[in-house]
Image (cartoon, helix red, strand yellow):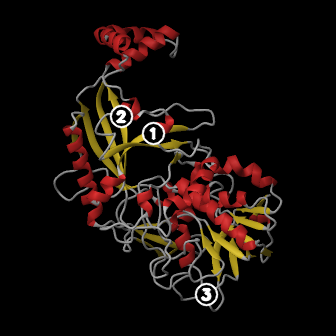
């Protein structure tokens, strides 16, 4: 069931078996997995069912490092979390993202990708996607249709699946009907009490913006509040005057990662009439998902050349005849807004030669509208960096919790290796006769002008078997705490170049199985 925490009498203590903090992709996935379990579950969600600014403003903080999407714009603080405005882009991390690598300090996960594959397959359904298949050949793109240099061995055409399902409205009816899973809206987790030993969570204090407070006591707690807020709540908890929970080695909040995003440059193709279908988005299929190809480095190239992962997206600039061809289609089918017929006729007349040439090539050779240029955008893997971190500032929010100070820091190799990748791409484009690349990377040490960090906040409670190198163990439990787990992208030891949501959901499913086994 779903209740309003503002109706809970102040001073109340709620006893449960599992308490989940946060109802975003991770929290809702966990809650759904527990709906049929024989134990009690409480979910605490800071917001309501819709966006309200007083709650959203609890995300305010200070950014003192490299530029990235503002803290109050990159996240949404209500039921469903940031899935309420995400693009729905999903793909797993690559196998190489899980492996330790020479020249990449702090790289690697406690297990290989193959270990996570069963949960990745289950995550496909949670995210309302197609089958667990991310090979281009599995989705009707034959290898012989992919021209060099995007068919290997250096660069490859890869794909993601896309479906922007809103976890909040989509899964709310299920959780409303779940008798043993109680979701409290407008409930802000404020402080974990671990007693005098900081070895076990005794209670969690909860506040509402209406001024009330209550306590949740559970056997197991799961912190699923997001890549920044997970670290914030840990740093703000524990004994008065301490350095937070799980922070014996000063790791909580460190290794904050984003994907650096930037304009790569522009390709002028040697043959503007070639078939570019291998790089165009697929149609929406039943189930409301589609495939979206992109360009990436092969694993062998990353390994041999010591380069990080990268996702390169494409956009086409078609020849002016494209507008005239669209006008012809509207005239033939009687489409378009009222009064547009004369404008479309004028457009066709002005481009009559181009339309005729297009029709001839389409009829005889099956060619499409000529492509004048291909614009490229990149999202790079960031090297884990302990100096990139989230800390607490002196300013407090309206609940009285200290706001965050985010210092996103990259190392010099992040830029130099991204530039080396783009130089390699330009070399391959020219060598294979595909065209020419005009890169946005100059000869100095600067990123392209539009460089920034994106919304993929990762790494502040990283996973590692060694407590001196990670906050949580391979089961996402805090090393120093017997009953506190963390879910979400904050546990990622590395971020690869993939959008993180599918991995967030897969790890939440894995954690749910672990907790069910533990409580059995």
- Residue named by callout 1: 136
| Discs 3/2, front | 2
Q: Closer to the camera, 255 or 65?
A: 255
Label 3 vs label 2: CA separation? 56 Å
Residue picked out by circle 2? 146
Percent position of residue 120, x then y? 57, 54
Could you say which quadrant of the image residue 216 lies in? Answer: bottom right
- The residues tagged by marks 3 and 1 sit, at their Cα atoms, a distance apart of 49 Å
Q: Name which of mark 3 and mark 2 comes first in the sequence.
A: 2
| Residue at far left of view | 443
Q: Determine which residue is flagged by label 3.
A: 198
Of residues 283 and 67, the one drawn nearer to the viewer in this rendering:
283
Q: Is residue 173 left or right of residue 444?
A: right
What residue appears at the point 64 percent right and 60 percent down from the top-left corner?
A: 509
Residue drawn 24% across the image and 54% down it: 419
Residue 231 in picture, x, y percent from top left: 52, 72
The residue mark sitting in front, 3 or 1, is 1
Q: Secondary structure at mark 3?
A: loop
- The quadrant of the rendering that contains the N terminus is bottom right
Task: Verify CB contact (< 8 Å) between mark 3 and mark 2.
Answer: no
Q: Are marks 2 and 1 in contact (CB under 8 Å)?
A: yes
Of mark 2 and mark 1, the one earlier in the sequence is 1
Q: Secondary structure at mark 2?
A: loop
> How dense is the environment of label 1, judged by Cα within 10 Å: few (below 14), some, or many (20 and up)?
many
């Amino acid at each position: 069931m779903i209740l309003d925490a503002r109706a809970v009498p102040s001073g109340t203590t709620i006893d449960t078996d599992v308490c989940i903090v946060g109802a975003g992709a991770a929290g809702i996935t966990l809650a759904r997995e527990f709906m049929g379990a024989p134990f009690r579950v409480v979910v605490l969600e800071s917001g309501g069912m819709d966006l309200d600014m007083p709650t959203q403003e609890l995300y305010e903080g200070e950014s003192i490092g490299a530029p990235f999407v503002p803290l109050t714009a990159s996240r949404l603080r209500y039921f469903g979390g940031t899935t309420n405005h995400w693009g729905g882009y999903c793909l797993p991390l690559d196998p190489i993202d899980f492996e330790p690598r020479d020249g990449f300090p702090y790289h690697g996960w406690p297990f290989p990708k193959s270990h996570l594959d069963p949960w990745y397959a289950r995550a496909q359904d949670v995210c309302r996607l197609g089958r667990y298949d991310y090979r281009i050949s599995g989705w009707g793109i034959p290898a012989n249709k992919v021209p060099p240099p995007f068919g290997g061995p250096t660069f490859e055409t890869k794909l993601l699946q896309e479906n922007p399902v809103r976890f909040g409205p989509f899964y709310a009816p299920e959780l409303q009907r779940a008798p043993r899973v109680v979701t409290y809206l407008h409930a802000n987790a404020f402080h974990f009490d671990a007693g005098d030993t900081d070895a076990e969570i005794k209670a969690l204090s909860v506040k509402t913006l209406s001024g009330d407070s209550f306590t949740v006591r559970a056997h197991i707690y799961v912190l699923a509040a997001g890549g920044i807020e997970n670290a914030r709540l840990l740093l703000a908890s524990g004994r008065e005057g301490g350095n937070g929970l799980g922070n014996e080695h000063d790791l909580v909040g460190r290794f904050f990662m984003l994907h650096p995003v930037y304009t790569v440059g522009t390709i002028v193709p040697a043959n503007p009439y070639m078939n570019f279908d291998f790089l165009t988005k697929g149609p929406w299929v039943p189930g409301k998902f589609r495939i979206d190809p992109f360009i990436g480095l092969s694993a062998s190239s990353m390994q041999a050349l010591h380069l990080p992962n990268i996702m390169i997206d494409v956009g086409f600039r078609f020849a002016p005849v494209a507008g005239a061809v669209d006008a012809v289609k509207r005239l033939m089918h009687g489409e378009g807004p009222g009064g547009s017929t004369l404008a479309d006729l004028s457009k066709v007349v002005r481009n009559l030669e181009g339309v005729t040439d297009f029709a001839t090539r389409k009829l005889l050779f099956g060619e499409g509208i000529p492509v004048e240029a291909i614009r490229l955008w990149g999202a790079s893997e960031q090297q884990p960096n302990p100096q990139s971190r989230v800390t607490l500032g002196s300013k407090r929010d309206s609940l009285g919790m200290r706001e965050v100070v985010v210092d996103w820091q990259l190392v010099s190799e992040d830029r130099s290796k991204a530039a080396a990748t783009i130089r390699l791409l330009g070399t391959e484009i020219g060598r294979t006769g595909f065209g020419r690349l005009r890169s946005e990377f100059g000869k100095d040490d600067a990123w392209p002008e539009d460089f920034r960090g994106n919304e993929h906040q990762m790494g502040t409670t990283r996973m590692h078997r060694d407590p001196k190198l990670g906050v949580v163990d391979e089961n996402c439990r805090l090393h120093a705490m017997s009953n506190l787990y963390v879910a979400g992208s904050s546990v990622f030891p590395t971020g690869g170049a993939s959008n993180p949501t599918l991995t967030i959901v897969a790890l939440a499913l894995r954690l749910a199985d672990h907790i069910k086994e533990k409580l059995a």
